[in-house]
Amino acid sequence: MKDLYLDFNTKDLATTTNFDLKFTENNSEFVSTKMENKLSFFKGEWFLDRTQGVPYFESVLVKNPDINLINTIFLTQIVSITEIQEVISFETQYFPDTRNFQVSYKVLVDDTTISNTILI
């Protein structure tokens, strides 16, 4: 599978040394990029369907968030990716001072284990 490759540090499209757009080269990069997109997509952001996305303003970025609800929201987003066969591990950590969430996951895709940590 191919998709545009995102630089996970800058969240921008990555380019090659010739300044061409870079594409994902394997299933691990494809699923990691898809996961980053899913978890960074705010509900109401897409004008064609305002119900799509993560309800950050409604449930996540609120005072005293319900961690169990947020874990369910993130896990639902992860399992909605059709290429993922199994979620091996999943953890979130909330940093109240900055209102950031760290999502760590390990999933199985085509007999390959993919693990990553995303800061939201």
Image (cartoon, grey):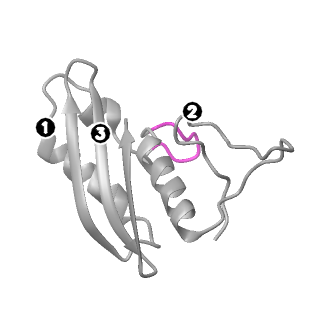
The numbered mark, 2 or 1, whose residue comes first in the sequence reads: 2
Residue 103 horizontal side relative to residue 39, left or right: left
Residue 28, position as x, y percentages in the image: 51, 65
Residue 57, position as x, y percentages in the image: 33, 30
Relative to 76, say whether 73 is above or below. Answer: above
Element type where label 2 sits in the image: loop
Q: Which residue is mark 2?
A: 10
The numbered mark, 3 or 1, whose residue comes first in the sequence reads: 1
Which residue lies most toward the front here? Answer: 17
- Quadrant where the N terminus sits is bottom right
Around disc 3, counting alpha carbons within 10 Å, would you say few (fewer than 14), some (14 to 19), or many (20 or more)?
some
Residue 108 horizontal side relative to residue 91, left or right: right
Q: Residue at x 29, y 39 (%)?
A: 102
Element type where label 1 sits in the image: loop
Around disc 2, counting alpha carbons within 10 Å, would you say few (fewer than 14), some (14 to 19), or many (20 or more)?
few
Q: Which residues are magenta?
A: 44-50
Q: Which residue is mark 3?
A: 102
Camera-nearest residue between 85 and 111: 111
